[in-house]
Amino acid sequence: MSELAITPSVAIPIQLVWFVATVLFVTGLRKLSIPAKARGGIWLAGVGMLLVISSMLFHPGLNSNFMLIAIALVSGGLLSVAHARRVDMSNTPQMIALYNSLGGLAAACVATLVLLHASEHTSAVKSLAVLGVAIGCVAFAGSLLAFLRLHGKFTKHDGFAKKQVAYLANGALVLLLGLIMATSATAHPGLLAVFVILAMSFGVMITMPTSAADMPVLVSFYNALTGLAVAFDGFIIANPAMIVAGTLVFAAGSLLTRLMARSVNRRLSEIMYSGFGLSSSFVAVQSSTDHINTIDARDAAVGMAYARRVEIVPGYGMATAQAQHKLRELTQLLDERGVETGFAIHPVAGRMPGHMNVLLAEAGVPYEKIRDLGEINAEFSDVDVVLVVGANDIVNLAARTDPESPLFGMPVLDIDKAKRVIVLKRGDGAGYAGVENSFFSQPVTRVLLGDAKDSVQDLITSIKGMD
């Protein structure tokens, strides 16, 4: 299993296919860094994966299982296409977490087969298999729980007393059992089962106490782990394409995790061990939106239509309302009136890295109109109107001013420096982290209550009525 037992006449074409697939993976990943080329990058990577899967069908050892493989490929493909077509953009983070959990499970299963035939493999191969099982199981269980939490099926749990001790004990047992299996000359199915359960429980322990506001960072971390497990599997079965694909995912996921953690001014260890939790005592003293200043769509539209510069700050509320297309139409109307428009994006806006960028790109917003936190914060003092669409945590000034707030220390968009702020808000609920935003009740702020999509349509209608 550690080597491809294929004849030279078959090996050379297969290796050529792997080389082409590797080039497609690298090129596709490079294109993903450019929003205008991201769709093409996805297609290239998808074609590369299809080539790798197809090439493995020519392996002589798979002839007897060809029908099972065909059934798995067809059923899995049809199910994934049907599921992906039903998922709207607001639920994309949940879909990513779910599919990443399946990737981790698949990687763990490949490595598990090696450990079930331990007598046929060297210690080096078994060591890689142990790592593949452990990392794959952590990614599977953690991503699956993240999916349930993002989907609202499971709420944050602060765990239990001495939870750090439990983490360390669980991790120590995983290491001990892994060492035993890596150095054992025979297979130990019972020991392997316990090892798998402990590895999965470690993933659950990491995810359970993590705050919802930290979930995008954690999903990115699990994505990197899945890539690492796939790379180990590639070494085990001597598949260069898997090694390259897994390494690319691991490297990109690790870098993204680091950038995401830095964007909220937190260390990954804090996210994994302590969470971002909100105590009940803090919730009890929050009442900042009791006296908000409201505005109607007509007045808000007038203020925007006669402004020199308008910046839009989208949040998850925009995704749930599917308001991105209406916002694009609104900015086009303002542009026609000579108003300078743009979008200010926080790195953790939404439920996954780049969530807002994806939604805006879907709506056809030019990339040059999208600015990230590092670019736009210095310019808010030059903005006449900031339109906040379904965002709370990323503009919550308590992150700068209130040491008692669980958001304290997280970089936020400095919308308070703008001349005027209009907030589109559906109700009086708190943000994703459960923290109210006192800035929404400040004199400079006006709140337009209602569904974001309907509110933006009202703004559009009012502006068109001015002509």
Image (tube, rainbow, N blue to C red):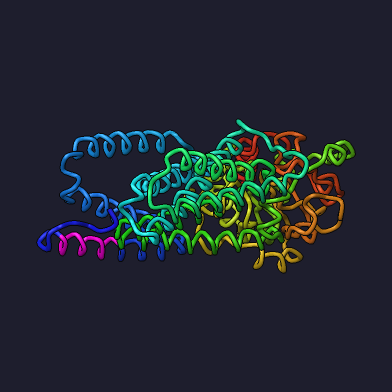
Q: Residue at x 37, y 58 (%)?
A: 125
Question: Magenta segment, which residues?
Answer: 11-21
Direction from residue 7 to residue 388 in the image, left or right: right
- Relative placement, left or right, of 160 versus 110 is right
Of all residues, the one furthest to the left in this rendering is 9
The residue lying at 73 percent from left, 58 percent from top is 412
Which image quadrant for residue 326? top right
Q: Is residue 422 magenta?
A: no
- Image point 66% across, 48% down: which residue? 169
Work out which residue is located at the far right of the displayed protein and give it: 285
Q: 26 or 119, which is in the foreground?
A: 119
Q: Is residue 220 above or below residue 318?
A: below
| In the displayed structure image, the side of residue 272 where residue 19 appears, left or right | left
Q: Is residue 13 magenta?
A: yes
Q: Is residue 12 above or below residue 233?
A: below
Counting from the top left corner in percent of width and height, residue 35 is at: 46, 59
Task: Name, please, the residue furthest toward the top.
Answer: 153
Determine whether 397 is above or below 430 in the image. below
* Residue closest to the far front: 185
| Majority secondary structure in the magenta region | helix
Residue 441 in view here: yes
Q: Residue at x 18, y 51 (%)?
A: 59
- Quadrant assignment, res 231: bottom left
Q: Is residue 465 visible?
A: no
- Quarter of image, res 105: top left
> Whole-percent x and y of residue 140?
50, 43
| Along the viewing direction, whichever of 84 and 281 lies nearer the viewer | 281
Foreground pick, 211 / 128: 128
Question: Foreground residue, 287 or 172?
Answer: 172
The x and y percentages for residue 75 are: 30, 33
Task: Report the side of 43 relative to 305 (left or right).
Answer: left
